Amino acid sequence: AVAALEFLPKQLHGSNVSLAEALIAVCAAGWQVRSYWQRRLLLASGPFLPLALGFLAVALISLFASSQPRYSLRDYREVIAEPVLYFIVLTALLTPQQVKRLVGVAVAGGVGVAAASLVAYALHRGVVTTEGVTRLGGIYPSPDNLALYLDRPLAMAGGLALWSSGQLRRLCLLACVPMALAVILSFTKGAWVALVLTAALAGLLINRRLLLLAGAAVVVAVAGAWLTQARRLTDLFSFGAGSTSGRRLLLWQASWNMGKDHPLQGIGLDNFLYQYPSYRLPGAESEPFLSHPHNFILDFWLSLGVLGLAWLLWAIATIVRVARRCLVAADAGQRALALGLTASLVVGALHGLVDNSYFLPDLAVLFWLAVGGLQLLAQGLPDIPAGKQEEG
């Protein structure tokens, strides 16, 4: 719930420490004390534990490729070690019955951030006016950062509402309203497209009415672009020089060239900002200082090297296997929770095709929250029967 407060850190002995970091440290200390009293290390085995430990090792190896080790070590702490520690503590101390509370806390955090941001928008604070629109940033320094955070709890609430009923469904739908409005007002096109595609995918697999909702969202976006002629909206359909899409293509080409020069080890965590000026292509001068390649596949390759790409494939395969098991073999309540958690991972991956996806502290915590929740839900579930495997 406090992951979004990473941009409001406090000074502690010369270092910036966020509230999320402080709470992870407190929970880890409690975990250690509990392990001491029980005379054993509390560590929940499961499909994602090897993945988490492997991630620590892969990221540690990547530090040797860094030309700016100070920043890489900070990134290792904030987006690798602490989120993985959060996952370990979460899965060790919580039970499958507490996953609903875990998801509820994440959704409540999203609602709180959205509500605070909408109040700021009404007061014309935390906004950026650019390309013919006024974009909502709220408590975040950038509207894109706000949307990157909110689309995940929004997907959790939407997925949970899809397979729940009664008061829980009403609460989830109510929670979606401020988060969806904040994402719309952020004018972050990557979030819009990711949410529409996630809804369309859920419509194909679960409820065809969502296809109509996704189609209506596309119609509204096209009509809004045509009526307002705001450059921020019309750029959505343009790949010409100077457009957002055109600049992304130049950035991806530069990132690919960077990867070809560092194919095995990559460039190290949080080193893109310092390498990019040497690779920036003509026509991309309007964005001279970018800190990541705006594509999660390129980001894992450049940040962690070829081992990072191997880990990413392992992660995707594990997530698909465990999510499918939860969605097929669990009871109705668990399936609703699994759908919400899976939807948050899907929307994060889709948005990550054109922006960041993992390498920010709040996004990293939300990722490990989702996979931790899936691991808890998968505990004790039977294997998927062969007949259902064939149907899938």
Image: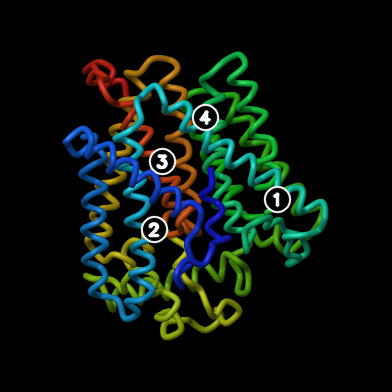
Residue hosting label 4: 159
Mark 4 touches mark 1? (CB < 8 Å): no
Mark 2 touches mark 3? (CB < 8 Å): no
For discs 4 and 1, the disc positioned in front in the rendered view: 1
Check disc 3: other Cα within 10 Å, few if <14, some if 14-19, many if 20+: many
> If you read the primary sequence from the N terminus, does the residue marked by circle 2 or circle 3 appear first?
2
Asked which colour scheme the image uses, the reply is rainbow
For discs 4 and 3, the disc positioned in front in the rendered view: 3
Q: CA distance from mark 2 to mark 1?
A: 24 Å
Q: Is residue 56 above or below residue 247?
A: above
Residue hosting label 1: 117
Q: Is residue 161 above or below residue 115?
A: above
Residue hosting label 2: 79
In the rendered structure, the answer to whether residue 35 lies left or right of residue 20 reads left
Q: Position of residue 78 (x, y in %)?
A: 40, 60
Q: Amino acid at mark 3?
A: Leu
Q: Amino acid at mark 2?
A: Val
> If you read the primary sequence from the N terminus, does the residue marked by circle 2 or circle 1 appear first?
2
Q: CA distance from mark 1 to mark 3?
A: 23 Å
Residue hosting label 3: 369
